[in-house]
Image (tube, grey):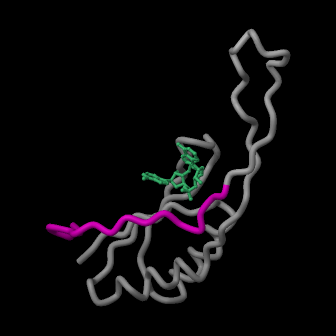
């Protein structure tokens, strides 16, 4: 058995949960925050049999899009510069960031 940890954009999370339910894949959805953008994203914990890992990864790939997000650059603290204004920077986010971990034991009481 494997644990898939999938970090996806909030915009994709509803559709992905629906796909998991339709395909009989059990998952837990957590609200999370990206360390860089400090914006909300969604983390799924998905416990699956080894033989199903590839199909789950494919489902995630099909339902998560790469998007460009604009963030403000940090202000410059170089006082020799004329300006300390921030400026918008485009950052490409996602589709999905995935970790696949081996599971020692899966128990439900
Ligand atoms: P964030 O940390 O908010 O990062 C959002 C996007 O900003 C990243 O997209 C990447 O394009 C960019 N980025 C992140 N750190 C950067 C840095 N130090 N310098 C320049 N650009 C940077 P993704 O790579 O698609 O990541 C999307 C989200 O997935 C991340 O949100 C974070 O929540 C998670 N993530 C990505 N890599 C991870 C890792 N190695 N471990 C844990 N979580 C990760």
Q: Is residue 72 or residue 42 the one in the foreground?
A: 72
Placement of the N terminus among the 4 image quadrants: bottom left
What is the total number of numbered labels drawn onto the structure image?
0
Above or below, 10 relative to 64:
above
Hey, which quadrant is residue 9 in on the image? Answer: bottom right
Residue 30 location, x and y as percent? Answer: 49, 56
Q: Is residue 109 or residue 94 the one in the foreground?
A: 94
Residue 88 location, x and y as percent? Answer: 80, 40
Q: Residue 74 in magenta?
A: no
Above or below, 78 relative to 96:
above
Residue farthest to the front?
A: 80
Q: Is residue 47 left or right of residue 78?
A: left
The residue lying at 64 percent from left, 76 percent from top is: 15
Q: Is residue 26 or residue 66 the one in the foreground?
A: 66
Q: Is residue 63 left or right of residue 52?
A: right
Q: Is residue 45 left or right of residue 103?
A: right
Above or below, 68 relative to 108:
above
Q: Is residue 52 or residue 30 the one in the foreground?
A: 52
The residue lying at 73 percent from left, 53 percent from top is: 69
Residue 3 location, x and y as percent? Answer: 31, 69
Residues rendered magenta in the picture: 92-109
């Amino acid at each position: 058995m494997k644990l898939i940890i999938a970090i996806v954009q909030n915009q994709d999370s509803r559709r992905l949960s629906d796909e998991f339910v339709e395909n009989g894949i059990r998952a837990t959805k957590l609200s999370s925050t990206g360390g860089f953008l400090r914006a909300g994203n969604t983390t799924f914990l998905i416990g699956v049999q080894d033989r199903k890992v590839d199909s789950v990864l494919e489902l995630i790939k099909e339902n998560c899009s790469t998007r460009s997000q604009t963030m403000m650059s940090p202000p410059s603290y170089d006082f020799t510069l004329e300006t300390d204004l921030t400026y918008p920077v485009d950052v490409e986010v996602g589709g999905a960031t995935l970790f696949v971990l081996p599971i020692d034991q899966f128990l439900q009481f």
